[in-house]
């Protein structure tokens, strides 16, 4: 007779009592684990509603989801293919041709896809193994007679495949390499098993004997039978409550589903849904789901008790069912039609919107959630589609602001993750676009007035994204036409000017890849006469002397010669290498005599007399 859990308890009672005595003898202390358990007490599942459906073609049976890729896989037995569907849009992305009547689907922890290929009643069948996303060529492995149900151990190390035939048996595969299963010894099971369920510790696999009207609990290590529970007619799928002490049995041939005590196998409750078929769960929300095709109903069960919390009606032929634990969407195929239906919690997530800002401005993203009391939120960021998500430090409010966005932030994605107990809702990603800042003049050049030969300095500045260039321009026709000043590419422009430059306008032009900005023009005024009257007089004498003693025009007796500077003023380069700018304009007056009488200055009441003779000499400035 198989050893049941009830019989095994007697053998461990002494050990348990010893542990309890030791615990009581120990000093009492704070128990953080107990406090955490109390804080994480189960809450009823949220309310669900139909949020979408799509016609995907008839003859659809097994279904599974890939939460990491938000994909839904649907096996079409008579069409001989696997449909790959986008979970958000419900669009069919592609189909994969498969032989031998693809029946049920399972997605492993790494995203590898497994499909039973039924083969026919009491006919040899197989399993198809596909890479994540159902891409590439499927690998097909023998799996006994009429393979049907699929289950995977919680640690992902074992794949179990049931047989919907007689005699039965559960094929076991080692998944050390998920894409290359290796068959292990077969476990015994009832005949005609349509589905399997593995316990949370991986130690027990539950097989529903469809024709036998019973569920067998099988030890996964020894292959021995732990228990055999009568259930009612045509059991399909078993689901365990969160504690594992109750099992919900979907019964195709009964007016209600049954809830059994897993310790005794005795029915402890029933669920008032007739002709139920398949089940799945969303542990994060504390919800289990059971389908009733002929009433078009999905029952939402409290995962902590197995009790019916809600009926969701209007689900076309609700048949096979799969829940996405990340998005919390639940999908069902139809036993009577061709529609794929999605139901979701009546929880509304407000997704952040893409933001476009100018460099240097703050970028703010806002998200929200309603229909459930969220107890936390965090923001995450990644640099692009293929980059991993990383949490943003101290970003725990409904809005997140990135201060002073930079051009390098363009293309970054941001999302919010809301939590409520063990459940979470993740928004869609919002993309940041940072535009470069066009130049903007912040300081304009000012008008300048100088004497001829003097130096004028113009300054301007601007803000804008790098690279930011500047050039100076001049206009001699009151701004009608502008010409670039050669070499003037800094924010400060300075040069010496003569009277011919008077009335010239100067402006700065700033440019970068995002635009250009022009400063206000500044006007230059140049008056006749140099900065010092004595210097001007000496310069005039020098010019006249240069012309009267036979030297060439523009040359002095000391070897200097004249030139024109950037500002248009006359320059003289002395023999010693120094540059001197003259500001004396030509007026047509007679040149001074070659011998200029010395100027006499009487100081302190005529006590001092100073005489100087200047002939062909210039005073350095």
Image (spheres, rainbow, N blue to C red):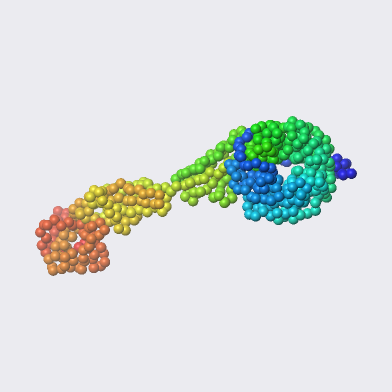
Whether 371 is drawn above or below 87: the answer is: above
Q: Position of residue 559 (x, y in %)?
A: 20, 68
Whether 271 is drawn above or below 383: the answer is: above
Q: Quadrant of the N terminus?
A: top right
Q: What residue appears at the point 49 percent right and 49 percent down from the top-left corner?
A: 410
Q: What residue appears at the point 25 percent right and 63 percent down from the top-left corner?
A: 579
Q: Would residue 35 be found to the left or right of residue 212 on screen?
A: left
Which corner quadrant of the image does residue 333 belong to?
Answer: top right
| Residue with the most extreme top position | 272
Q: What residue appears at the point 78 percent right and 54 percent down from the top-left corner?
A: 184
The answer, for residue 534, to whether it is visible in the render is no
Which corner quadrant of the image does residue 603 belong to?
Answer: bottom left
Q: Nearer the viewer, residue 434 or 527?
A: 434
The answer, for residue 588, to whether it is visible in the render is yes
Which corner quadrant of the image does residue 259 belong to?
Answer: top right
Q: Nearer the viewer, residue 171 or 270?
A: 171
Q: Position of residue 351 (x, y in %)?
A: 55, 39
Q: Would residue 252 be found to the left or right of residue 64 on screen?
A: right
Q: What residue appears at the point 84 percent right and 44 percent down from the top-left corner?
A: 226
């Amino acid at each position: 007779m198989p050893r049941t859990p009830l019989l095994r308890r007697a053998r461990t009672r002494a050990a348990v009592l010893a542990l309890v005595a030791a615990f009581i003898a120990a000093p009492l202390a704070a128990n953080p684990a107990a406090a955490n358990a109390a804080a994480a007490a189960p809450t009823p599942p949220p309310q669900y509603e139909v949020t979408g459906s799509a016609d995907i073609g008839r003859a659809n049976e097994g279904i599974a989801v890939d939460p990491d890729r938000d994909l839904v896989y649907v096996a079409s037995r008579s069409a001989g293919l696997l449909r790959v569907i986008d979970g958000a849009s419900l669009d069919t992305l592609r189909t994969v041709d498969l032989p031998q009547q693809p029946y049920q689907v399972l997605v492993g922890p790494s995203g590898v896809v497994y499909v039973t290929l039924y083969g026919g009643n009491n006919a040899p069948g197989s399993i198809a193994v596909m890479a994540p996303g159902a891409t590439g060529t499927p690998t097909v492995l023998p799996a006994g007679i009429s393979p049907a149900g699929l289950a995977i151990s919680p640690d992902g190390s074992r794949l179990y495949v049931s047989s919907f035939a007689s005699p039965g048996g559960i094929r076991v595969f080692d998944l050390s390499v998920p894409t290359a299963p290796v068959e292990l010894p077969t476990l015994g099971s009832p005949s005609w098993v349509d589905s399997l369920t593995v316990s949370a510790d991986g130690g027990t696999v539950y097989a529903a004997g469809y024709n036998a009207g019973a569920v067998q609990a099988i030890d996964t290590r020894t292959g021995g039978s732990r228990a055999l529970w009568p259930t009612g007619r045509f059991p399909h799928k078993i689901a365990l409550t969160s504690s594992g002490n109750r099992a919900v049995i979907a019964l195709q041939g009964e007016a209600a589903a049954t809830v059994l005590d897993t310790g005794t196998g005795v029915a402890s409750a029933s669920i008032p849904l007739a002709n139920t078929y398949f089940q799945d769960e969303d542990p994060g929300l504390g919800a289990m789901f059971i389908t009733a095709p002929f009433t078009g109903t999905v029952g939402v069960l409290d995962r902590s008790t197995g009790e019916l919390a809600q009926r969701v009606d209007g689900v076309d032929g609700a048949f096979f069912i799969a829940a996405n634990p990340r998005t919390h969407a639940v999908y069902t195929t139809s036993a009577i039609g061709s529609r794929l239906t999605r139901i979701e919690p009546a929880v509304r997530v407000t997704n952040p919107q893409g933001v476009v800002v100018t460099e240097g401005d703050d970028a703010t993203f806002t998200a929200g959630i309603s229909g459930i009391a969220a107890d936390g939120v965090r923001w995450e960021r990644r640099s692009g589609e293929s980059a991993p998500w990383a949490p943003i430090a101290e970003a725990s409010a409904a809005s997140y602001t990135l201060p002073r966005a930079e051009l390098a932030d363009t293309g970054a994605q941001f999302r919010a993750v809301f939590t409520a107990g063990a459940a979470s809702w993740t928004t869609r990603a919002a993309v940041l676009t940072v535009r470069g800042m066009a130049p903007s003049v912040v300081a304009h050049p000012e008008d300048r007035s100088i004497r001829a030969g003097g130096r004028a300095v113009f300054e301007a500045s601007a803000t804008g994204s790098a690279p930011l260039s500047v050039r100076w321009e001049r206009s001699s026709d009151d701004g009608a036409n502008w010409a670039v000043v050669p070499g003037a590419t800094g924010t400060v422009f300075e040069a010496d000017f003569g009277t011919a430059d008077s009335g010239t306008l100067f402006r700065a032009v700033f440019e970068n890849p995002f635009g250009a900005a022009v400063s206000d023009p500044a006007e230059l005024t140049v008056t006749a006469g140099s900065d010092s009257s004595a210097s001007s007089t000496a310069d005039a004498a020098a010019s006249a002397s240069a012309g009267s003693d036979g030297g060439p025009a523009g040359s002095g007796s000391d070897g200097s010669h004249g030139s024109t500077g950037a500002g248009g003023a006359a320059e003289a380069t002395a023999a010693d290498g120094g540059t001197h700018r003259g500001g004396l304009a030509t007026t047509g007056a007679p040149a001074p005599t070659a011998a200029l009488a010395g100027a006499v200055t009487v100081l302190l009441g005529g006590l001092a007399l100073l005489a100087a003779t200047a002939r062909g000499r210039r005073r350095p400035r």
